[in-house]
Amino acid sequence: MDIKEIQSLIKFVARSGASEVKLETDDIKITIRTGAADSGGETTYIQQIPTPVAQAAPAPPPAAATPAETTTSKKEEDSKYVTIKSPIIGTFYRKPSPDKPAFVEVGDTIGVGDVLCVIEAMKLFNDIESEVSGKIVKVLVDDSSPVEFDQPLFLVDPS
């Protein structure tokens, strides 16, 4: 696969509206993500798959903390928290209107039924209410950004 084919594939995926496309052939692996919530843009990963070689490669030096270990410890740390996820696709808003304060801030104590945010879907504003009581530990989405179904929005400490 040459660079022109890859570029046309990226353009096609961007126009199609798909959020992620993975393509894998014998010698190349391509992942294209468009409109990701965390980056707001387009991300393309291209990985050349090496052909097996009879010689043994030298072992890499040990790292202080590999990204996998860091991710695992982060997940263990976050596992004690309850994740509040988006029930619908739409645009996430922390405030009821631009001139009003946010529904909740980090450190606020919430109860069951408290409104946490609003998600706009097809010109309708849907209040997202808490299903748990606790304290807001982290807001995982930026204000006015698109969210997907089941995307984590808040971390809540239920204790």
Image (cartoon, grey):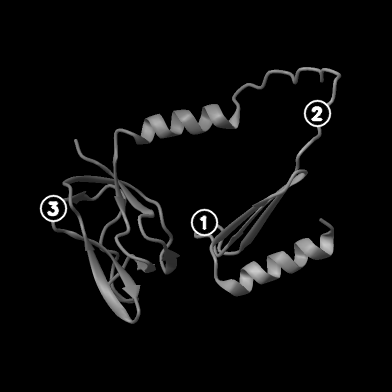
Q: Are marks 2 and 1 in contact (CB under 8 Å)?
A: no
Alpha carbon separation for disc pair 2 and 1:
36 Å
Spot occupied by residue 152 in the image (x, y as percentages of width and height): 37, 51
Identify the residue under disc 3: 112
* Amino acid type at image mark 1: Asp
- Image location (x, y in percent) of residue 97: 30, 76
Choose mark 3 or mark 2, whichever is in front.
2
Q: For numbered disc 1, what is the local secondary structure?
A: loop
Looking at the picture, how far across and down is residue 10, in whole percent? 69, 65
Q: Camera-side residue: 72 or 65? A: 72
The kind of secondary structure element at disc 3 is loop
Query: Which badge, 3 or 2, comes first in the chain's sequence?
Result: 2
Using residue 147 as the reference point, say whether residue 117 is left or right of it. Answer: left
Q: Where does residue 62 sit, x and y in percent of width and height?
A: 68, 18
Q: Which mark is residue 21?
A: none
Report whether 23 appears left or right of 111.
right
Q: Crowding at label 1, few (<14), some or many (≥20) Cα neighbours within 10 Å?
A: few
Q: Earlier in the sequence, mark 2 or mark 1?
A: 1
Q: Amino acid at mark 2?
A: Pro
User: How many badges with numbers are in the image?
Assistant: 3
On the image, numbered disc 1 is attached to which residue?
38
- Which callout, 1 or 3, points at the residue further toward the start of the chain? 1
Asked if 78 appears above or below 137 in the picture, the reply is above
Q: CA distance from mark 3 to mark 2?
A: 56 Å
User: Is residue 61 toward the left or the right of residue 128 in the image?
Assistant: right
Residue that badge 2 annotates: 52
